[in-house]
Image (cartoon, rainbow, N blue to C red):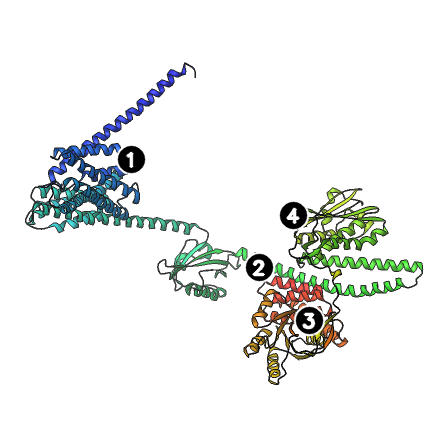
Amino acid sequence: MSGITKPYLAAFRGSEKATQLMAIVRIAALYLAAGCMFGAIAHLAIDLTRGDGRIAMVWIPNAIAVAALLRWDAPREHLLFAALWMGNVAANLVAGDTFATASTLAASNLVEIGLALFLTRRFVGPRPDMRKVSDLILFVCFAGFCAPAASATIAMTALQSASQDILADWLKWVLTDGLGMILIAPTLLTFIDAARSPRAPTRRECIEWLLLTAIGTTIVAAIFIQTEYPLLFLVMPVVLSHAFRLGTLGTAFSIIKIGTIATLCTWLDRGPIRLFDHSEAVQFVVLQSFLASVFLVGLPVAALLNRQKDLITEMEDRGMQLGLLADNMSDAVMRYDLAGVCTYASASVVDVLGQPREHFVGKGAADDVHPDAKDEIATVKSRLVTGQTERERFTYRRVLDDSDGRPVFIEADCVLVRCERSGEPETIIVSCRDVSERVRLEKNLVRARRHAENAAIAKSQFLANMSHEIRTPMNGVLGFVELLLQSDLPEEQRKHAQLVQESGNSMMRLLNDILDLSKIEAGQIAVTEERVDLRDLVASCLRLHSANAAKKRIKLEEAVGDDLPEFILSDSLRLRQIILNLLGNAVKFTAQGTVTLRAYVDQHHLVIAIQDSGVGIEPTRLEAIFQPFEQADNATSRRFGGTGLGLTISRHMADLLGGRLSASSEPGKGSLFELRIPLVIPEGSEPIKAESRAPAAHHELIAGARILVAEDNDINRVLVSAMLERCGQTVDLVKNGEQAVAAVMEAKAKGAPFDLVLMDVQMPECDGYTATETIRSLGISANELPIVALTANAFEDDIQAALNAGMQAHLAKPLQMEALAGMLQHWLPTIGPRAVLPCASETIGSPVSPSLQERWISRREEAIDAVGRALREGALEGQSAEELARIVHKLAGTAGSFGEDTLGERAKSLELALRSAGNLDARIQAAEALLDAA
């Protein structure tokens, strides 16, 4: 720091200290003046009101100090307390007290002031409002009783030697100081607040103030000047008139006026107080009680009236705001009572409902409305009034159409308002708006959607029919071509047959691609999560394309990363389809060179990359090739052929698997297609590969057990019976649950009970659940007769429902011989020893007779026709849906037994959609999927 700046800095610091010193001096002078004033008021109170005793009859200095400190923030408040203590000590010394007594009494007053301030600030607030009843009551409690009680306890230590009755003096001190607190402090606080927020009174208020003050002063003075009549009761009407007409400020002024007149007159031996024939001390106690009653009647009533006035003003303001909002908002707002009669309508009803508000007020909600809306409005009102619902929204047609004669539709939001105390319905608030344009748009959308759905149904049916009609002759063509190629043909004819075969295969591929794309667009393709042997999947895909690659002398290479898990969770069918499409494209568009398939793990993803050395693709065409019927360019299409659907289908499949398919290429150098899907590794033990499963050629079963089959589908009855008889069992057949219960009870009565029951869960008249519960309720336990559920649905809920009904196990349709044999082995060995017969592990294909096959074909066609007819006629809801669900249930339980597993799965999905509370779209999609599978 330079030598030049040091003097200036020192001077600055000196001036700052001088300013602080001057501030301290000013505060000290102000506090000394306050202490002197406190002492003077204390001396006056002691000299004028103490009578023969040491305790003053009216003590106001503490109340003045508390009021001042609650409205002004005093810096260094402890210094002010010291000044007040010195002023009080001086007043006590002048009154003749010793220094010890004077000091103790002054200390007790400081304790009273400090405690009143602390309690009020802590529990009421730093700025208590005497216009609030709650603040006034708490202040009276803390400052009018708690603080004086503490002060009196300290003061008694100084006065105990001069007093003969400590308790009486303690009570007198509390009453004296408390009276000053409740009379003076609230009044001064009211005066200070009025002075800080001055308001020019109106001429009427000035006249009212002058008249009431003059009349009140005259009446009070007349009461306390005379000494003949006890007219104290006339003071209360004066106080109440001031409270009702002049508010809190006028009441505070009235209390001060009455207290001053009463105290002076009593001190001068005038007024009703002197009529009491008692000592002067008793008379002053009566005076204190009277002044306290004046306060307790005046200020609380004024505070209550002020609160009432504030509430009224607040309600008026709120009403004005609500009215302003209701009259200027676009919606029409209406209020109805519980009888449905309109009690209020906003101005906007003219714009929304087309009629003035006077037209609606006093009328019922369903009066003068459009006939189409009358019942709906009455229903909504009934639901609201009875408490069935708290809110309702509905759209109805207005009684008046617009100027062009078009119908006007109104959307109404109805809210039931309940009483806050009782919770009972009180009124209904309705908000209405014009939604005619939206209703018209919705109708157009519904119409367009219906057309689109019909078109989709027609498309699905057309594709299903065309697929069937094309596949049937093409299968014959390809089959006979294969036979021709196996015969001894001349070279030229062999070439012609090979061309026919290639054309037929191309047409079948095109048909499959079109069907796949149609299913994707309709959202009918779903993915399943299963364990996939990835290395085996990759190897099988390469094997399928090895022949074509070998013809073109293209080398197929496989590069599988060491970090690749053996099994992943994915959809093997969709994953295989993507890889086969990509490999097929790579081989097709590569004239010579290499096609490489790489599979590796990249963080949390599985990456399958297929790279070729083919013709390549222009970078600008990389996204276009994923669009339907698009290839790299026209020359490519002419040269290599194809529909351009393979990549489109593959990308959609990748999206379904939660991944993405991307491409990169350079013309003349080949292309790279990369499939990236989430890598999910299954938990638990690794499954046994299908190739390594040892075929269970025979199952050792106990022959001759009596088995009851309850099944309503005649085809399934024959199938299950054939399978059981093939295992050497004796079978009885029934068609429903009632017959099953009767058969079980009859067999038991004859002493030849059944050893096992196979119970279909969905049967007419009495289902399998009810039949099982009935059998168990008749005393036949599971140990005596095991019951196994048969159903086309193998969901967890179905299995649990079967167990809850009293069944012991569950078999899903279509039945497999191996699963059936395993179930028989589990439940039948507990029966007595019998001869053992072999039971083939193959499926039910072998025991099907030609007549049964014909019956299956007939039932299959009937079910497919029923689904198609329901789609065309829109009969997928209500009773028709129930009937259709029963039909497809039978189809679901039988199709797999005749080698049509996909058809059975689609039938299960349609049955579930029909029986669940799903939307119509889900049922339509499930029905279309079943037709596609057919």
- Which comes sooner in the sequence, label 2 or label 4? 2
Residue at 85 percent of width and 51 percent of height: 550
* Three-letter code for the amino acid on which mark 2 is drawn: Lys
Instruction: Say if 27 sits above or below 817 in the image.
Output: above
The residue tagged 1 is 73
State which quadrant residue 687 falls in: bottom right
- Which comes sooner in the sequence, label 1 or label 4? 1
Q: Is residue 619 visible?
A: yes
Residue 56 x/y as whole percent? 13, 41
Element carrying mark 4: loop
Q: Nearer the viewer, mark 3 or mark 4?
A: 3
Element carrying mark 2: helix
* Three-letter code for the amino acid on which mark 1 is drawn: Asp
The residue tagged 2 is 443
Most foreground residue, 404 or 382: 382
| Marks 2/4: CA–CA distance | 48 Å
The residue tagged 4 is 604
| Marks 3/1: CA–CA distance | 95 Å
**If the image is split into quadrants, where does the N terminus sit?**
top left
Most foreground residue, 825 or 16: 825
Q: Is residue 204 visible?
A: no
